[in-house]
Amino acid sequence: MIEAVVIDDEIKAIQSLTWELTNFSDEIRVVASFTDPYEALNYLEGNIPDCVFLDIEMPIMDGFQFMQKVKDREYPIIITTAYNQYAIKALKNEAIDYLLKPIDTDDLNDTIIKIKKYNQKNDTIERLERLLIGFNSNMVNKRITINTDGKLIFLNSDEIMYAESDGNYSTLYLDDGNKVVLTKKLKEVDDMLTLENFFRVHNSYIVNVNKVKEFIKTDGYLVLQSNDRIPVSRQKKSNFLDLL
């Protein structure tokens, strides 16, 4: 059963589309509908439907603005509108289909096929992702899984020199000179790097202690094998010495 959400500022349009969907096919049902796009956003933060039918022309927030706010969505969006001039823009915003009101039954059938294909593809990707994460977490030489920019990166723990905070972002510096930027705060990175060889020496830095070449105690900083200098906060200094 395909679970759909309908978003349209006109209650009659919602009722009409809901009737069309439920009477057209027993494979789809409307689980929620909204005339206020902000209420819809709140709902979608905690719920993942199989698809969203979205009107374009809404006074509070138009459909394209709505799509920008749910960029990392796990569900397909189908544009519904009485105006055909939005078709190209809808597809550029990664809507999987575009339905003109009043909705034609043949067009609706094509849309349902597209929804199924989209969700089948995502199911395959999710199964592969779970398999890869499980495989890497069970390896004798522990590997760390980084989820960033729509891809998974698998790193041996010994490849990471240190992590540096940049507000809501963090950067992993690797021993080959490359770096990986994450949309995570350093606290989240610290929770992710659970192996014993990582230590948060400063509010802005986590280091791989296996990569420490020198500890300049008088000045309170580390020299790594890469010759990077990492400050050690006073609060962390004694704990770090105990670790060494």
Image (cartoon, rainbow, N blue to C red):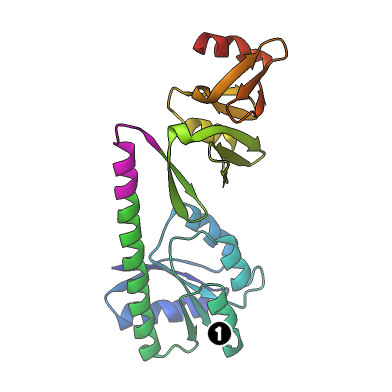
Q: Is 143 located above or below residue 65 in the figure? A: above
Residue designated by label 1: 87
Numbered disc 1: secondary structure: helix
Specify whether 202 is left or right of 139. Answer: right
Does residue 232 show up? no
User: Relative to 110, does residue 133 appear above or below in the rendering?
Assistant: above
Where residue 107 sits, quadrant-wise, is bottom left
Q: Quadrant of residue 2?
A: bottom left
Q: Residue 158 in magenta? A: no
* Rendering coords of residue 167 (x, y %): 67, 39
Where 106 sits versus 10, above or below? below
Name the residue nearer the viewer: 219 or 106.
Answer: 219
Front residue (pair 157, 63): 157
Estimate the x, y position of residue 75 in percent, counting from the top left.
Answer: 43, 64
The residue at the point 42 percent across, 26 percent down is: 195
Question: Residue at the spot x=56%, y=22% of the render?
Answer: 212
Direction from residue 191 to residue 130 in the image, left or right: left
**Residue drawn 34% across and 44% down?**
133
Question: What amino acid is labelled 1 in the image?
Answer: Ala
Residue drawn 62% across the image and 34% down it: 164
Q: Position of residue 19 (x, y in %)?
A: 38, 80
Q: Total marks drawn?
A: 1
The location of residue 244, given as percent across then percent down, is: 51, 12
Above or below for 95 versus 239 = below
Quadrant of the drawing holding the N terminus: bottom left
Instruction: Say which of 144 and 213 sits in front.
Output: 213
Magenta stretch? 131-143
